Image: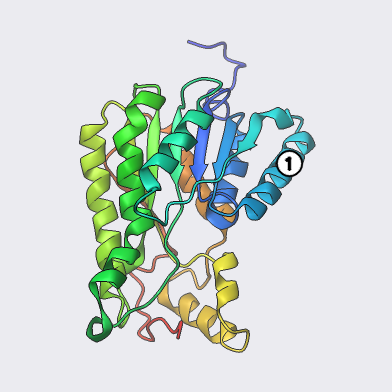
């Protein structure tokens, strides 16, 4: 047992190596920032070099501000959008991320851009593209992970899902199906990668940079609709929901599950539906 004066909880990630995919902005960035504050060495990745460079600079500045070494933050681009290159790109990322030792935790927050396609307009290509990053990317990552991660219960792989799997809006059937696949993969990964732990964080509406794609005149109505969908009366912040990912890393008894951070959307009684269009 550690001495009575030693920290038992806040240092659980001290010295751990954490890889976050989709970390240049939003939820992924905040997960990397939170892991850094918990004493981890962080490797961040996204598909956009310019955004990634800015994220690394911000994280390194934050490290210095909290008295940590900026050397504990590195980054590498990884494009997950092309089927012909996705597996090779993931291998290159894992090779880069483990130059200093095997990983302890991997977090997958990368996702396809939201593209709502009505069933009447669905094509094989549109369906394939919907799951390219989340489904194919996570599968290829899980396939190669055992070679690059410390294989024990202290290690974890956390993926990202959403409430639209359980409460889809109009014309969200394809997106809901993709989210359902992620939750199913979580359970399969947990069994196949054991003792490495695998969990899914189910997000509700989180106000990230993705909202910049919504026309300014529509944004207030969209945010109001999202507030009504839950029972907190709020839209989530990336720094709030990042805590769920940190939990998945720290609790060595948690695996094969779905951790919810969604403002109570699955029990809310809002009837307006989502108004992104």
Residue at image position (72%, 46%) is 58
Screen quadrant of the C terminus = bottom left
Q: In the image, 254: left or right of 61?
A: left
Q: In the image, 117: left or right of 59?
A: left
In depth, the one of 182 and 79 nearer the eye is 79
User: Label 1: which residue?
Assistant: 62
In depth, the one of 46 and 205 nearer the eye is 46
The total of numbered circles placed on residues is 1
| Residue 1 at x, y percent in the picture | 47, 10
| Residue 67 at x, y percent in the picture | 77, 30
- Residue 214 seen in the current view: yes
In depth, the one of 36 and 231 nearer the eye is 36
Q: In the image, 118: left or right of 249?
A: left
| Residue 245 at x, y percent in the picture | 46, 44
Give the secondary structure at mark 1: helix
Asked where in the image residue 116 lies, by quadrant, the reply is bottom left
Q: Residues within 10 Å of mark 1 (few under 14, many from 20)?
A: some
Residue at image position (46%, 67%) is 205
| Residue 269 at x, y percent in the picture | 34, 78
User: Looking at this rendering, what residue extends furthest in the bottom direction?
Assistant: 217
Residue at image position (32%, 42%) is 140
- Which color scheme does this rendered protein use? rainbow
Asked where in the image residue 204 lies, by quadrant, the reply is bottom left
Residue at image position (62%, 43%) is 33
User: Looking at this rendering, what residue extends furthest in the front direction?
Assistant: 84
- Residue 167 seen in the current view: no
For residue 104, above or below residue 260: above
For residue 136, above or below residue 167: above
């Amino acid at each position: 047992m550690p001495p009575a004066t030693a920290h038992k909880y806040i240092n659980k990630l001290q010295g751990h190596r954490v890889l976050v995919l989709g970390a240049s902005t939003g939820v992924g960035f905040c997960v990397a920032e939170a892991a850094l504050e918990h004493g981890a060495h962080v490797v961040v990745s996204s598909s956009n070099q310019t955004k990634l460079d800015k994220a690394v600079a911000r994280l390194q500045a934050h490290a210095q501000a909290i008295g940590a070494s900026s050397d504990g933050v590195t980054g590498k681009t990884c494009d997950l959008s092309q089927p012909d290159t996705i597996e090779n790109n993931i291998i290159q990322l894992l090779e880069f991320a483990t130059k200093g030792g095997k990983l302890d935790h991997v977090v997958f927050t990368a996702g396809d851009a939201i593209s709502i396609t009505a069933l009447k307009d669905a094509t094989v290509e549109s369906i394939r593209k919907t799951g390219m990053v989340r489904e194919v990317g996570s599968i290829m990552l899980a396939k190669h992970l055992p070679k690059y991660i410390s294989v024990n219960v202290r290690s974890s792989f956390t993926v990202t899902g959403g409430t639209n799997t359980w409460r889809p809006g109009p014309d969200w059937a394809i997106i809901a199906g993709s989210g359902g696949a992620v939750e199913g993969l979580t359970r399969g990964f947990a069994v196949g990668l054991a003792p490495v732990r695998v969990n899914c964080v189910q997000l509700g509406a989180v106000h990230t940079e993705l909202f910049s794609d919504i026309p300014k005149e529509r944004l207030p109505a969209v945010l109001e609709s999202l507030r009504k969908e839950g029972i907190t009366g709020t839209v989530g912040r990336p720094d709030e929901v990042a805590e769920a990912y940190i939990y998945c890393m720290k609790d060595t008894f948690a695996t094969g599950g779905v951790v919810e951070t969604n403002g109570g959307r699955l029990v809310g009684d809002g009837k307006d539906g989502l108004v992104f269009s």
